[in-house]
Amino acid sequence: MNYSTGKATSPVKAYVTAYFALFLISLAAMASYFAYDCIGPLTPLLKEQLHLSATQVYWLYSIYSVPVILFVVIGGVLADKLGVKRASILFVALFAFGTILTATKKFEIMLIGRFLFGIGAECYYVVMNKILAKWFKDKGLALAFGVSLFLMRAGTYAAFFGLPWLAENFTLSAALWIVAGINVAGLIANIIYIFLDNYGEKKKYVSFVEQEEETFKLRAALKLPLAFWVISLLCVTYYSAIFPFQAAATDFFTERYGMDTISAGRLAGTIILISMFATWIFGAIVDRIGKRATMMIIGSLAMIPCHVSMAYTNINPWIPMVILGLSFSLVPAALWPALPLMVKQNQLGTAYGVIGMIQNVGLFFFPLAVGAIRDSMGSYKPAMIMFAGLGVLGLVFAVWLKIVEAKGGHYLEKA
């Protein structure tokens, strides 16, 4: 590691420069989140205008997870070899190119585009973490991560809120090309960041030039404790009940409640809108009182009745969607900070790599399962039962985690 020995001559300028850098790299990430979730709110129109089956539409989600499972470790290695600046340009350019291919509306080319998009976006997130550590180590790193996550989720919400309106009032092509244009703008923001980074290094606004981080090691993965594997099972079941449902939610609401695409998309985005704000609150509560395993139990339990009630009762769908949003704020706020408490510091990179791979195995298979159910049965109702079943499994794993932690003394329940 090559640390800079000098100090910034102007702390105020260093602070402003750091947050401008945060804004620029988060713009690229926000654009990628906008693109990732562009399929869900446009599902009814993709089926109607491109004559795609539900299974074909959800392949556009699942194909994204293939490179996540296979290539993220390689992305970390490339980031170390190329350096974060060159790696960031490479990966942002790759996912922006993927969105351009997706905008062609030819299914096979769209699949290739989503695959390339997945490689670029997920590898960029690895690089982004390194960039944040470069600018904010020992000076507000947690806040920087929180700001970047807020902006990225804003990208997801913008997709559900705005894309159906664009497609209905203009064309489906216009909506998809706007997605591509925003991602090209993210590439431009990344290029501007490179110049800013060079300026920051010259002015010694950054504490070090490059940081090597502990990365995925297969041998180390085999030594991870039981609690880690339990929380990984909770992670994959919980997120598989949230993200694939959100992908299908716009189409589900149009069929189940007779909503127009615009209203259905905005209702589907409720989960993300709530989590943008409530995650901060629950995170502060968890930091103050602990009870991480208990919080995961509560969040998993709250999710179970939501899917079933929307499919089989006349409940106003806003009620279970708000509950889902609160659940999706509580569980991640407790789950992700729990990992450093249950694994050794030199295993942390491996732990994050393993849990990310396990999570994306679920995010590959369950969207395809939803599509197959919808195509074969003509309804999303059986898929909603599947989501509820995943919620039950998540609750079981959350309870198991609390039992394991009580015996192992990892102190997840302590502040």
Image (cartoon, helix red, strand yellow):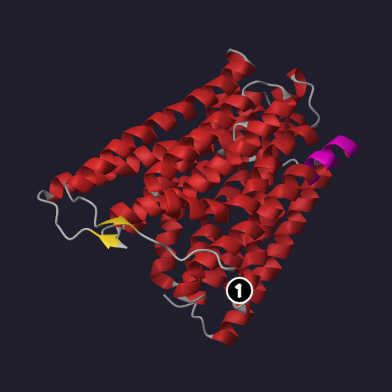
In this picture, residue 132 sits left or right of residue 176: left
Furthest residue to the front? Answer: 81
Furthest residue to the top? Answer: 170
Closest to the observer, 252 or 127: 127
x then y, percent, for residue 27: 40, 36
x then y, percent, for residue 340: 47, 71
Kind of residue at disc 1: Arg
Please tell me which residue is depicted at 60% across the width and 76% down the height of the picture.
227
Please tell me which residue is depicted at 73% across the width and 64% down the height of the picture.
393
Please tell me which residue is depicted at 81% across the width and 43% down the height of the picture.
381
Q: Secondary structure at mark 1?
A: helix
Closest to the observer, 146 or 312: 146
Q: Main secondary structure of the magenta part?
A: helix
Q: Which residue is mark 1?
A: 219
Q: Is residue 193 visible?
A: yes
Please tell me which residue is depicted at 14% across the width and 47% down the height of the picture.
12
State which quadrant residue 130 falls in.
bottom left
In this picture, residue 85 sits left or right of residue 4: right
